[in-house]
Image: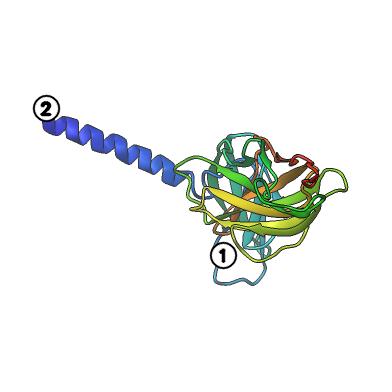
Amino acid sequence: MKKKLTYLIVAIAFIAISSVAKAQDGTSPYAGSTHSYSVTPDANSANKSYLWEVSGGGTISGVDDETSVLIDWGTTPGIYTITFTETDESTSCATVRELQVEVIANTFYVDMAADAAECHDSTGLVLANGASGPTTLYFTVNLNKDAGWNIDSWEYDFSVAVAGTDYSVSSVKVDGGSELGAGPHANISVAGTQASSEIAVVITGPVSAGTDLTVTVSNGEAVDGTSTTPDNGSGDKDQVLTVNPLPNTSEISAN
């Protein structure tokens, strides 16, 4: 009985692993993803013509009359059929190949951490009245997807907006990298093993004035080999961090 139970557990685990593996290739693409498909045609290419067709659920991107094709899968999960036909135009004889594809629900999206507020970085320091200085704000972009879906990398675009005219952006860095400038910025690439990405923005302005800084992300994309899957649209796309002003205290006067 114990041995049968062990076999059953192993079988269930194998099924689970197989299900995860199946979700990582073009036979079970995520909705919205793009995958390539190809065949090896007859060695004698004289008078041969080729044609790709899709029964539904996706559209062919680019040409449909070569030995490979790029298919953009739509937003509707379901089972669809890819058909390839090779025809000998001199005889009208044709060979047809089919591949059944199961489009599954897209679980990938990026979102931002919760809004928050903090004091100007100069809080608690001895400053001259009317002083200005820098404050660094850290924004977090989160990766969301099925735990079993392994991707090579993920990408996003982002923009930075400062409320009012008292403050200006003096530095923008992602994950401790090189200086990027005020932006906006496109195609920020993050390793697929990294669950979040940090955007550090330095703003400079008068310590006695507060401001809101907003980072908005868009165009999230998961990359797995040559296939890509766009953000499914879920989740918050911006984070607002508020810099609270320091008290506008005068210099100390003496009698």
On the image, numbered disc 1 is attached to which residue?
Answer: 41
Question: How far apart are labels 2 and 1 at the CA level?
Answer: 52 Å
- Marks 2, 1: nearer the viewer: 2
Q: Please state the horizontal and vertical placement of residue 203, each as a whole percent of the image.
A: 75, 53
Q: Which mark is residue 1?
A: 2
Q: Is residue 65 visible?
A: yes
Disc 1 residue type (three-letter): Pro
Instruction: Tell me residue 98's x, y (percent).
Output: 55, 48
Nearest to the observer: residue 21 or residue 46: 21
Q: Would you place residue 177 above or below residue 27 in this image?
A: below
The image position of residue 90, as x and y in percent, is 67, 65
- Asked whether residue 64 is in view, the answer is no
Query: Mark 2 falls on what kind of element?
Result: loop
In this view, the residue in front, 159 or 152, is: 159
How many numbered callouts? 2
Would you identify the image quadrant in which residue 112 lies? Answer: top right
Q: Looking at the image, is 211 positioned above or below residue 169?
A: above
Screen quadrant of the C terminus? top right
Q: Nearer the viewer, residue 180 or 153?
A: 180
Q: Residues within 10 Å of mark 2 (few under 14, many from 20)?
A: few
Question: Which quadrant is home to the N terminus?
Answer: top left
Q: Mark 1 Cα within 10 Å, few/some/many (few <14, many 20+)?
A: some
Q: Amino acid at mark 2?
A: Met
**Above or below 232: residue 167:** below
Residue 41 in which image quadrant = bottom right
CB under 8 Å between callouts 2 and 1? no
